[in-house]
């Protein structure tokens, strides 16, 4: 191989919110290697997905041309024909039923620029706020908890603050598998620097085994033990009075809201001994800085927003904001969950969380876009499904999301898709959801496009095109522009940098972002001032409320809805596994990874396996109120008692965990309560 025929291209990983960046070595379309070198979030590290999860870009299953439905089959079509059909059908529905009969779902796997164009298409071209992204499925409750208390929904510091903290608490996060490189940095600080580590989770995963203190609360009860710890701190006068006096409002009301949460009550509800909770409280107040990181074990519950609020309240009363080595770290799942939300792919906000019901905000966008924006809040993902069943939502344009597998209660969602009058799916593969589409558009994956992602620590980074788009596939931003122009717009973007210039002009959080400032491995953490100064640590000068003070927010305990009963006697938990990503459309097409982990399984505790006469590899049928799956058993002491765990990643749609989950959601954000499911197990 001659050196000059090899290209080295900087990109950013698409597999989790850590945002590892590295160079991809290519020769023509061959991927030679992935080499991390200068990543601001990862240094020289990647996990197995970032290193080996890229074969899928050359899969023979890639979509390479638009497809149009003809009866039960699809036929290849030209871009011109596909775009013209989309414009005709969407236009007709809009004329007959109004703009709110249409809906748009952006992808948290795609770039900031692509999320921006999707919401612009919805608002400025079609005239609806019916636009959302998959943060609805994961992190919206965390954002809600932080908005209520500290004003910004993002991580309050950087990954390096997690290394510097005296104490890290992980709640409902299997960090070593879901955010592996971030976990490595915490593990190193714990082992080499004496950092204390507390983990609260249902499963005894790697981080739990490493922890100084492992709490195993009953499912869905984190709010109760967090509130009891907070009440104990206030009762014992261990709070940070100086910080509270200067920077926080609402102490009296908050204190009153904690009245029910004695240590004894918490022990009865959560199963965690009162003495252990006293120890947690003392660890927090004695630590030189506490960071709390949390993920879907907290958010994907009926009370996800309430528990996220309780976490932030606890940090506020102990003075764990506004300084390095402290703060709140909701770990974003997808690589660009943060960015897709920042870009306004949400029904109530345009870019930078500017509310659509604010006339001044709408006027600013109208003047730049030359189009009036709708004032009413739109539908979120969950409400869209209901609106399809109600007959008010007629069309959907979905990109980069296998919604029929990843939304909860998948059988119910399938039924909704069947009722759509017109359905456009845009993806890299012919996903299971695409089976319901009228038009399928072939998109390019990250290695075939330029753009930016924003990781869990609000860090904006550039990715560069390493490969030409395969066949007739196109980057999503080009496709969305094609749809917009077919609907009558006159967009003329020739490079994503022009889209970022527009974003910077309208979104204060991104005001100083330019492609030049992000060249190569450079990065910026929002808010970015017009001159380019960024913000690794939020709240240094106060909180983004009129008086600069944070707000203690009295929250309430919302008990799980699907507690096991006589008929459905087992608690069913689900989440990620290290080797695979999300529904598996990419990593199960990456040979190196699939060879190691070819499929899914259900984890069963040794005691339950003994009770049911089960050994590893035996197939069982899991049945919930909403559906059933057939899956092999893995006997492991990671789970205990009558709790099951199943990875959400599977190559078989009929085996997806969401065949079992229901439609109940977090009350404040409509994030599905994926973790609140009861099943029974039939041995096959
Ligand atoms: Fe890094 Fe996450 Fe990608 Fe692994 S999956 S390489 S931790 S960004």
Image (cartoon, grey):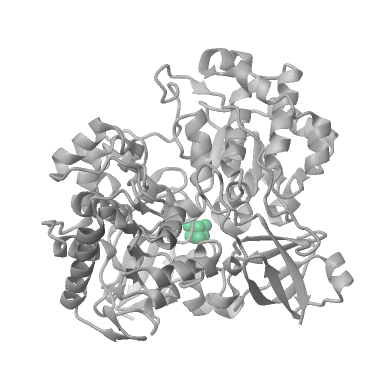
Measured along the vertical axis of the image, is residue 381 above or below residue 589?
above
Measured along the vertical axis of the image, is residue 429 above or below residue 267?
below
Residue 118 or 439: which is nearer the viewer?
Answer: 439
Number of numbered labels in the structure image: 0
Say which residue appears at 58% left-offset and 53% top-offset: 664
Measured along the vertical axis of the image, is residue 120 above or below residue 567?
above
Asked whether, in this view, residue 627 is left or right of residue 236, the answer is left
- Residue 566 percent coordinates (x, y): 81, 61
- Residue 474 percent coordinates (x, y): 25, 70
Q: Quadrant of residue 506?
A: top left
Q: Quadrant of residue 4?
A: bottom left
- Residue 1 percent coordinates (x, y): 33, 81
Say which residue appears at 16% left-offset and 62% top-offset: 487
Q: In which quarter of the image is the C terminus?
A: bottom right
The outermost residue toward the right is 611
Residue 294 or 420: which is nearer the viewer?
Answer: 420
Measured along the vertical axis of the image, is residue 541 above or below residue 137?
above
């Amino acid at each position: 191989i001659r050196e000059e025929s090899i290209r080295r291209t900087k990109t950013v990983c698409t597999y989790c919110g850590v945002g590892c960046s590295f160079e991809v070595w290519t020769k023509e379309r061959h991927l030679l290697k992935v080499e991390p070198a200068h990543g601001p979030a990862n240094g020289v590290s990647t996990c197995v997905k970032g290193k080996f999860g890229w074969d899928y870009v050359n899969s023979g299953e890639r979509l390479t041309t638009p497809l149009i439905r003809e009866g039960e089959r699809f036929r290849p079509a030209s871009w011109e024909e596909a775009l013209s059909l989309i414009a005709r059908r969407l236009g007709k529905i809009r004329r007959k039923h109004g703009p709110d009969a249409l809906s748009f779902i952006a992808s948290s796997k795609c770039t900031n620029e692509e999320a921006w164009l999707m919401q612009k298409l919805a608002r400025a071209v079609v005239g609806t706020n019916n636009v959302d992204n998959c943060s609805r499925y994961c992190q919206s409750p965390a954002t809600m908890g932080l908005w209520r208390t500290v004003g910004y929904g993002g991580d309050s510091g950087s990954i390096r603050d997690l290394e510097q903290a005296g104490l890290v608490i992980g709640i409902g996060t299997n960090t070593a598998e879901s955010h592996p490189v971030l976990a490595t940095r915490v593990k190193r600080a714990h082992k080499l620097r004496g950092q204390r580590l507390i983990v609260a989770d249902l499963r005894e995963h790697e981080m739990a085994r490493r922890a100084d203190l492992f709490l195993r609360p009953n499912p869905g009860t984190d709010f109760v033990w967090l509130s009891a710890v907070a009440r104990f701190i206030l009762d014992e006068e261990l709070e940070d009075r100086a910080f509270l006096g200067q920077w926080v409002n609402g102490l009296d009301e908050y204190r009153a809201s904690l009245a029910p949460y004695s240590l004894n009550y918490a022990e009865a509800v959560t199963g965690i001994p009162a003495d252990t909770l006293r120890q947690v409280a003392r660890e927090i107040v004695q630590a030189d800085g506490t960071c709390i990181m949390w993920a879907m074990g907290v958010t994907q519950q009926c009370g996800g927003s309430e528990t996220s609020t309780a976490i932030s309240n606890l940090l506020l009363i102990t003075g764990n904001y506004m300084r390095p080595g402290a703060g709140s770290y909701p770990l974003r799942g997808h690589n660009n969950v943060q960015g897709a939300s920042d870009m306004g792919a949400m029904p109530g906000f345009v870019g930078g969380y500017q509310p659509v019901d604010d006339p001044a905000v709408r006027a600013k966008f109208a003047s730049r876009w030359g189009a009036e924006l709708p004032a009413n809040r739109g539908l979120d993902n969950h409400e869209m499904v209901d609106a399809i069943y109600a007959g008010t939502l007629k069309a959907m344009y979905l990109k980069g999301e296998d919604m029929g597998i990843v939304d909860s209660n998948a059988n119910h969602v399938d039924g909704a898709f069947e009722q759509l009058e017109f359905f456009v799916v845009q993806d890299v593969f012919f996903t299971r959801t695409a089976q319901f589409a009228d038009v399928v558009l072939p998109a390019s994956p990250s290695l075939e496009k330029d753009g930016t992602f924003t990781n869990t620590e609000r860090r904006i980074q550039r990715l560069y095109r390493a490969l030409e788009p395969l066949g007739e596939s196109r980057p999503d931003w080009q496709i969305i522009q094609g749809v917009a122009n077919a609907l009558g717009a006159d967009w003329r973007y020739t490079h994503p940098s022009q889209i970022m210039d527009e974003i910077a002009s309208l979104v204060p959080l991104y005001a100083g972002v330019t492609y030049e400032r992000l060249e190569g491995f450079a990065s910026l953490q929002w808010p970015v001032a017009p001159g380019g100064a960024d913000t690794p640590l939020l709240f240094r000068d106060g909180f983004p409320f009129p008086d600069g003070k944070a707000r203690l927010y009295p929250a309430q305990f919302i008990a799980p809805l699907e507690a096991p009963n006589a008929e459905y006697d087992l608690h069913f938990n689900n989440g990620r596994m290290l080797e695979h990503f999300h529904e598996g459309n990419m990593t199960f097409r990456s040979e190196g990874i699939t060879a190691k982990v070819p499929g899914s399984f259900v984890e069963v505790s040794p005691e339950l396996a003994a009770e049911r006469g089960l050994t590893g590899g035996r197939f069982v049928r899991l049945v919930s109120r909403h559906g059933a799956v057939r899956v092999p058993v893995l006997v492991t002491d990671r789970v205990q008692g009558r709790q099951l765990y199943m990875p959400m990643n599977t190559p078989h749609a009929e085996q997806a965990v969401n065949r079992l989950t229901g439609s109940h959601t977090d009350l404040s954000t409509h994030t599905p309560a994926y973790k609140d499911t009861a099943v029974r197990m039939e041995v096959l």
